[in-house]
Amino acid sequence: MEQPLSSLAESHYENFPVGSFLLPKEFRGPIRLVYAFARVADDIADEGSDPEEARLRRLDEWEGEFRKAAAGNSGMPFFRDLHGSIVKYAIPTSLFLDLITAFRMDASGKDYDTFEDLLFYCRHSANPVGRILLHIFNCANTETERLSDCICTALQLANFWQDLSVDIERNRVYIPREDFERFGLRAADMRNGGGNDAIRALIQFQVERTKKFFHDGKPLLRSIDKRFALELRLTYHGGLRIAEKVERLGGNILHQRPVLSQYDWALIALRSLSSR
């Protein structure tokens, strides 16, 4: 945790800018603190070979340090800095606790029966980050939070489909059981297939649903604080581009993880600069 917070955040987010130079300098530190908090907890839940019990115990410890910080009692420099940002920007502490709830779900390797179950995960894993950023930029209200939730859910879903080939190897599939049944498939078919029509149709179904969340949240691009607008647009169009690449791969997404090329980034930049 003592490594530079900027490198901790920047080294893990290949698709989207994190507290980048596009933002006024005063906001970069607080945003990187937020991502560092989430990154450490995510690594506890996902990295290494520790058993589930050990991961959950470490997440409990991480939450305990956060709760001490929220009360102004943490002895860790990182948490003291985070507490300062929480106070300065009036960020609800519940948003950080929601993130830890999602990481506990990751540590437990939870499967999802319904799409609503998966949305519950997104409401805890991705949506809190967007809401925290809205507070940092002093533009959190009922409408901006609703739009932010749509975009953050879309980004989380796009990340799921981008990582299908990786997650399959870890026996983790985020596609809900009801969706497998809808297309006459089982989760095991994802490990054995990749070329049949049912799998292609299942992937297309997931991408179309994801793109609708992007569409529903797009008005935020026009209403957000201008100091945050370009980075938000790059994040938005980066996630949408990933969804497009997943769609193009179809069933082959089970064997190939799409990444953003220089061409993709040029296209994302063009779309971001022309977004209104």
Image: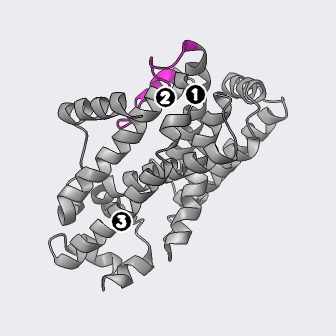
Residue depicted at x 56% and y 33%: 224
Q: Is residue 190 left or right of residue 128?
A: left
Residue depicted at x 73% and y 35%: 91
Q: According to the image, label 3 marks what residue?
A: 206
Dividing the picture into quadrants, the one containing residue 170 is bottom left
Per the model, the C-alpha gap separating discs 3 and 2 is 28 Å
Front in this rendered view, residue 26 or 266: 266
Inspect the image, locate mark 3, and give the three-letter code of the amino acid beneath it.
Answer: Gln
Front in this rendered view, residue 87 or 164: 87
Secondary structure that dominates the magenta span = loop
Q: Which mark is residue 229?
A: 2
Q: Nearer the viewer, mark 1 or mark 3?
A: 1
Q: Is residue 109 above or below residue 262?
A: below
Q: Quadrant of the N terminus?
A: top right
- Classify mark 2: helix, strand or loop: helix
Per the model, the C-alpha gap separating discs 2 and 1 is 6 Å
The disc, 3 or 2, on the residue closer to the chain's N-terminal end is 3
Inspect the image, locate mark 2, and give the three-letter code of the amino acid beneath it.
Answer: Ala
Residue depicted at x 30% and y 29%: 269
Range drawn in magenta: 6-25
Residue 75 placement (x, y as % from top left): 77, 26
Query: Are there few (<14), some (14-19), or many (20+) residues within 10 Å of tag 1?
Result: some
Is the Cβ of the residue at disc 2 closer than 8 Å to that at disc 1? yes
Q: Is residue 209 left or right of residue 220?
A: left
Q: Which mark is residue 225?
A: 1
